[in-house]
Image: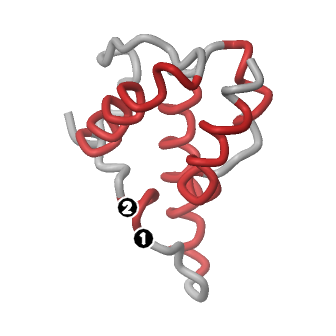
Amino acid sequence: MAGSDNNSTYRIEALKSAEGYLAWNTQMSDILEDQGYTKYLTDNPPTTDPDAITAWNQGDRKALTAIQLRVALSLITHVRSMTVAVTRRYGPFFASKVLDAQ
């Protein structure tokens, strides 16, 4: 499935609250790994080559789409403008603050 971009292939329960975050995070990590998007979670984006930056931004957007499709509508406003890199850095904050407020 790597790089298939077929977000409908994976069926997991949408993230709705902090209570389900750990299981959801594990499943999302598996999905992103299978789709070849883990580099957007672990690597730093390129900074000099315009083509590499464009490719990175496109891949980052696809990874974010995979995540957003698995978040409850009530939480979409909290993640819609993020990049995967931002999600990576603030994921624990998101889980503890935003989800607990729901």
Which amino acid, mark 2?
A: Lys
Q: Which residue is mark 2?
A: 39
Where does the image place residue 64, in percent across and percent down from the top left? 56, 40
Q: What residue lies at 74% left-to-right and 14% top-to-bottom?
A: 74
Q: Are marks 2 and 1 in contact (CB under 8 Å)?
A: yes
Extreme residue in the bottom direction: 48
Label 1, secondary structure: give it: loop
Extreme residue in the left direction: 1
Q: Which mark is residue 6?
A: none
| In the depicted structure, whether residue 17 falls above or below residue 26 | above
Label 2, secondary structure: give it: helix
Q: What residue lies at 59% left-to-right and 15% top-to-bottom?
A: 16
> CA separation, marks 2 and 1?
5 Å
| In the depicted structure, whether residue 48 falls above or below residue 35 | below
Q: What residue lies at 33% left-to-right and 40% top-to-bottom?
A: 29
Where does the image place residue 15, in percent across and percent down from the top left? 53, 19
Q: Nearer the viewer, residue 69 or 19?
A: 19
Where does the image place residue 93, in percent across and percent down from the top left? 65, 47
Q: Nearer the viewer, residue 11 or 26?
A: 26
Where does the image place residue 18, in percent across and percent down from the top left? 57, 25
Which of the image's four quarters has the N terminus?
Answer: top left
Q: Which mark is residue 43?
A: 1
Which amino acid, mark 1?
A: Asp
Q: Tag count in the figure?
A: 2
Q: Quadrant of residue 47?
A: bottom right
Q: Classify residue 89 as left or right of residue 8.
A: right
Colour scheme: secondary structure
Q: What residue lies at 46% left-to-right and 20% top-to-bottom?
A: 20
Q: Quadrant of residue 102?
A: top right
Q: Residues within 10 Å of mark 2 (few under 14, many from 20)?
A: some
Q: Residues within 10 Å of mark 1 (few under 14, many from 20)?
A: few
